[in-house]
Image (spheres, coloured by chain):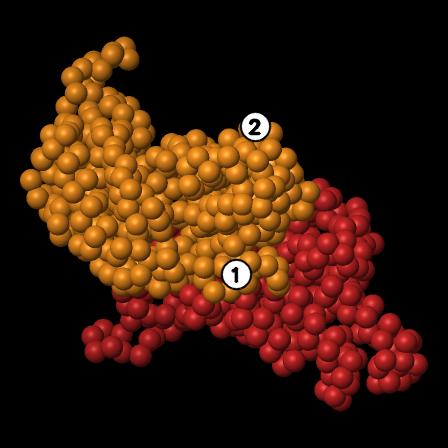
Chain colours: A red, B orange
Amino acid sequence: MTTAVRKVQNRNQARLLRLLRDRGPLSRAELTDAVTLSKSKVAVELDRLTAAGLVQDAGQAASRGGRPSSLVRLWDGLRFAGIDVGATSINVAITDGGLTTLAQRQGDIDVSQGPEVVLRAASQMVRDLRAETGTESLAGIGAGVPGPVSFSEGFSVVPPIMPGWDKYPVRDRLSEEFDCPALLDNDVNIMAVGEFHAGAARGIGTFMFVKLGTGVGAGIFVDGHVHRGVDGSAGDIGHIQVHDQGPVCACGNIGCLEAFFSGAALRRDAVLAAQEGRSPFLAARLAERGALDVLDVADAATAGDPVVIAMIREGGRHIGEVLAKLVSFFNPGMIVIGGGLSNLGGTLLAELRGTIYRRSLPLATRNLPVVMSELGDSAGVLGAVRMISDHVFSHDPALRMADVRELA
Amino acid sequence: MTTAVRKVQNRNQARLLRLLRDRGPLSRAELTDAVTLSKSKVAVELDRLTAAGLVQDAGQAASRGGRPSSLVRLWDGLRFAGIDVGATSINVAITDGGLTTLAQRQGDIDVSQGPEVVLRAASQMVRDLRAETGTESLAGIGAGVPGPVSFSEGFSVVPPIMPGWDKYPVRDRLSEEFDCPALLDNDVNIMAVGEFHAGAARGIGTFMFVKLGTGVGAGIFVDGHVHRGVDGSAGDIGHIQVHDQGPVCACGNIGCLEAFFSGAALRRDAVLAAQEGRSPFLAARLAERGALDVLDVADAATAGDPVVIAMIREGGRHIGEVLAKLVSFFNPGMIVIGGGLSNLGGTLLAELRGTIYRRSLPLATRNLPVVMSELGDSAGVLGAVRMISDHVFSHDPALRMADVRELA
């Protein structure tokens, strides 16, 4: 079965496919009600979708009183792949048409090794998972990388931590290799899409997802769509300057948000606190392991280490002060906090909330939940498959390129 | 002719009306091409729109080779009214269906006198302009007020400088009084709509309009739509805290952006500079007039008063630092500066641009023009009539409430 055969022909087919993706098998009667088309029109479209290998019969539905209606579901051989490339790790998943994960794998990489090395690893993981799940062909691949992306062109643009990736045709390479449609976005946007699809922000059209990882970034949803900005750099809040003075950032500037607080900054501060003897807990851990990571810091906080707790509080305050300004500007319906630093848990969340609520306009925060990611490490791959499934289950080329979007 | 008669019945009628509004009289052949419908379908819809008193014939079009095609235009009796309520002034205009201003009037008010007094003045101005322009009835009224607005409910919500306006039914009162549809938004949003319709941001779907007036606020456009946020408070950047210490703001907090730089802050600083003898120019002007306003400050800058120039530069830097953060977050395609302080001209604009370009991410500013408003005092009323005309020229109630929006 080739890609061309699977093409969606019109808006009604797209709506039927998304209904079946989001609600599971439905009876013909339920589908007819949901799309407000005539029974015969729905039957025609379902026949075409069946012929295209996108849907299949699924037996008889429970009777609603009249003649029993047959159940319809997405073709059970439909497969999407999601690839979430982080700075130091890679997550790959294969799902069915309804975006249920069939198999998932995580690996260590170093994104600075360049696209050839990283994509070779990613492709191998996809091939392994295909074998594991008996997947013949993929209906689409969604991918995310940790830096600014030109969504329409399918490549990274001057990514600061990704030497060699600038304008490398990631999307087209994946599309060719696996002979299916592909889309590329930045990692924070696909995590936001994941939380929108099945996580903390389900049903919330306008929200911010804030990734506190090695770097800091935001994914922005406006009315159910990802807001990428005119150059694809929207949400790039890690290099917002929070002070004239301060630590030098990896980008070369002084006082950037992520130079104050991020995975990288926290490791730097934790090692310093260990070496200077201010944190006996971290000193012992450093002596034991030779390095410190976010989980060590979280353990120190749980053990009640006052220096570490103060470190987390100060970091949360820096992030919160920036978010408070953005809340006044953007007035979101929710803020979801994700990324590795969300392992710091309650202390971080309390400081973030306190700062945001204290510093933003009361009108903008009276209905503003600030919550932790529900999907954790899976947000990215799930967002990636949601993104590509919206693309595949569309008929309009403009809409297909616009990705995640509710069909009106 | 009643409101009910003018109701648009379907999407094609809405598209025809907006084409005639935005492009002026068109031939039936041109309309047929533009909406990609059959000639006979277009003829049917035009007949219905003519019967509804929304369009009319306008003679013969120049021949395109075949049979001459007749010209169609919006009914020349169509009238929209726009009301732009500021903190200290009110602007009212009446336009035709194509949004050409037929008459405009400005008056002084004090918005703190409450909605009864202010709306009585506004209504009188609308009535005067109706008499002046021979307007029988209005097809719609758009209005803006200087504070947070619940767009869907049509009233102000806890507006800081507007005692008595909280939840006062402005929209419904205007709609009843003039027997036509009405919409209410905040003043900055309608100014942004005006610049989008016919000003600096024409054709720019994603941009920020920044009003530097008595207060400071932003109007946000995302993909051709006003972004109001979930509580209608998006763009309320005047109370973003820029320093822990600093002047006390009218809102009661310390260090708000508009306490550092705004019309109110500038008057305060100018009077101080005059009284303390730091600015001989302003001291002389104050002695002469007993008060100082933005134009006095602009004159002092033009005359080369170094203290005043430094004052404007420092203010521009404060605004620019906040805008730089928002640019990194939002990645707009343009920033338009409007409001009374735009009279400060080149000095202010240079400082704003310098700060924004220096402090934002290079990727987000490489295509970012920062320009002055083209419409000045007329941006608000023009945006108000554009907003209500989009509402009137729609068929879908959801779309009608969503206002400014390109029909796909």
Q: Is residue A350 above or below residue B315?
A: below
In the orientation shown, which residue stands out farthest toward the left?
B1
Which of label 1 and label 2 is nearer to you?
Answer: 2
Q: Say left or right for A343 vs A387.
A: right
| Disc 2 secondary structure class | loop
Residue A287 on image: x %, y %: 93, 81
Residue B388 on image: x %, y %: 26, 44
Residue A57 on image: x %, y %: 40, 67
Identified at 52% across, 54% down, the residue is: B259
**In front: A223, or A104?**
A223
Q: Say left or right for A12 vs B207.
A: left
Number of numbered tags placed on the structure image: 2
**In front: B306, or A71?**
B306
**In front: B42, or B150?**
B150
Q: Is residue A20 above or below residue A225?
A: below
Q: Which residue is mark 1?
A: B248
Q: Which residue is mark 2?
A: B303
Disc 1 residue type (three-letter): Val
How many neighbours does mark 2 have within 10 angstroms: few (below 14), some (14-19), or many (20 or more)? Answer: few
